[in-house]
Image (spheres, rainbow, N blue to C red):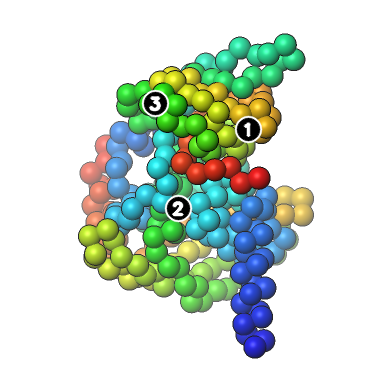
């Protein structure tokens, strides 16, 4: 009974955070970001990102928050909606206004052609406090799926130099 | 937004179709169009702006007139980063927003946005 209550409270807080402008607790910034993506709340997700954001995603760099918002956030929203992200492990550290949140997720689902999605995604998030609220200033995602990683890196190698 | 960022974004769009999660194929969560502001509309008597001229990114034919009515517009860059508006009407190149969300003032030429087929949560 207590477990159900705690789950309910957690879900309730994430629903509220999905429209948040930041979070008072470092890990909440990360969870609220994922919740906003899953809720298709673009502005809510953006509000949890520091304007100095840099994203490393499977060997690809989004050097600015604008680049990430324009180039990859829509796909991350699609992925968040299409697949289930189950938090498996988490460590939180750092001090002062800079903290880190290390998370691993089991990501499962199906692609439109029926191909299963089943992989572990590792996430490093650095969050920065501005005023009373933490926002994400760096994200780094990688996966244990070697073929997925290879495909992404091959694609990266085919990109023109810039 | 500076020219360097526009150039970088254009290079990204030309050079990369798949990256990160993009390599896993999933259905789009929303129908959406991204674009760039190319000119601001004329202000009203109080100086408030509710429309702008836009072009789609990546390059594509103009918007279907009236298709975007009621869709959610979110700014992805500039002073109004993360600001949300409801599209009241559109032509192939012009977007007009609903006054209920306030004016577009602060939006600038070259700012990026996304328009998504979902109602604004109020």
The answer for which chain carries disc 3 is: B
The mark that comes first in sequence, 3 or 1, is 3
Q: Secondary structure at mark 2?
A: helix
Indicate the position of residue A84 as horizontal and vertical percent values. Answer: 43, 68
| Crowd around label 3: few <14 · some 14–19 · many ≥20 (10 Å) | some
Question: Going 53% across and 59% down the picture, which residue do you hit?
Answer: A34
The label on residue B67 is none
Question: Going 24% across and 65% down the picture, which residue do you hit?
Answer: A115
Mark 3 and mark 1: Cα distance apart in space: 22 Å
For residue A69, above or below residue A3 = above
Indicate the position of residue A128 as horizontal and vertical percent values. Answer: 66, 54
Q: Secondary structure at mark 3?
A: loop
Question: Going 50% across and 51% down the picture, which residue do you hit?
Answer: A40
User: In the picture, which quadrant includes the N terminus of chain B?
Assistant: top right
- Residue identified by numbered label 2: A77
Do tags 2 and 1 sit on the same chain?
Answer: no
Indicate the position of residue B122 as horizontal and vertical percent values. Answer: 66, 45
- Residue identified by numbered label 3: B63
* Front position in the image: B22 or A60: B22
| Crowd around label 2: few <14 · some 14–19 · many ≥20 (10 Å) | many
For residue A91, above or below residue A31 = below
Q: In this rendering, would A49 be left or right of A150?
A: right
Do tags 3 and 2 sit on the same chain?
Answer: no
* Front position in the image: B31 or B16: B31
Q: In this rendering, would B22 be left or right of B45?
A: left
- Residue identified by numbered label 1: B80
């Amino acid at each position: 009974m207590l477990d159900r209550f705690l789950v309910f409270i957690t879900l309730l807080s994430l629903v509220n955070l999905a429209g948040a402008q930041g979070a008072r607790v470092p890990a909440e910034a990360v969870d609220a970001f994922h919740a906003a993506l899953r809720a298709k709340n673009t502005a809510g997700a953006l509000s949890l990102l520091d304007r100095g954001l840099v994203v490393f995603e499977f060997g690809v760099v989004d050097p600015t928050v604008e680049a990430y918002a324009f180039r990859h956030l829509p796909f991350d929203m699609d992925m968040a909606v299409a697949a289930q992200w189950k938090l498996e492990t988490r460590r939180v550290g750092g001090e002062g206004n800079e903290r880190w949140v290390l998370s691993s997720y089991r990501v499962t689902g199906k692609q439109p052609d029926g191909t299963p999605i089943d992989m572990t995604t590792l996430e490093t998030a650095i969050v920065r406090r501005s005023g009373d609220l933490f926002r994400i200033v760096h994200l780094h995602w990688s996966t244990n799926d070697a073929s997925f990683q290879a495909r992404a890196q091959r694609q990266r190698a085919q990109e023109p130099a810039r | 937004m500076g020219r360097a960022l526009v150039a970088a974004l254009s290079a990204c769009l030309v050079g990369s179709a798949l990256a990160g999660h993009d390599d896993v194929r999933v259905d789009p969560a929303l129908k959406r169009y991204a674009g760039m502001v190319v000119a601001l509309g004329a202000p009203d008597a109080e100086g408030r702006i509710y429309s702008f001229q836009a072009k789609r990114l990546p390059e594509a034919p103009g918007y279907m007139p009236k298709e975007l009515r009621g869709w959610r517009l979110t700014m992805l860059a500039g002073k109004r980063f993360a600001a949300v508006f409801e599209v009241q009407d559109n032509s192939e190149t012009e977007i007009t927003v609903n006054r209920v969300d306030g004016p577009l003032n602060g939006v600038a030429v070259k700012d990026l946005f996304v328009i998504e087929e979902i109602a604004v949560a109020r």
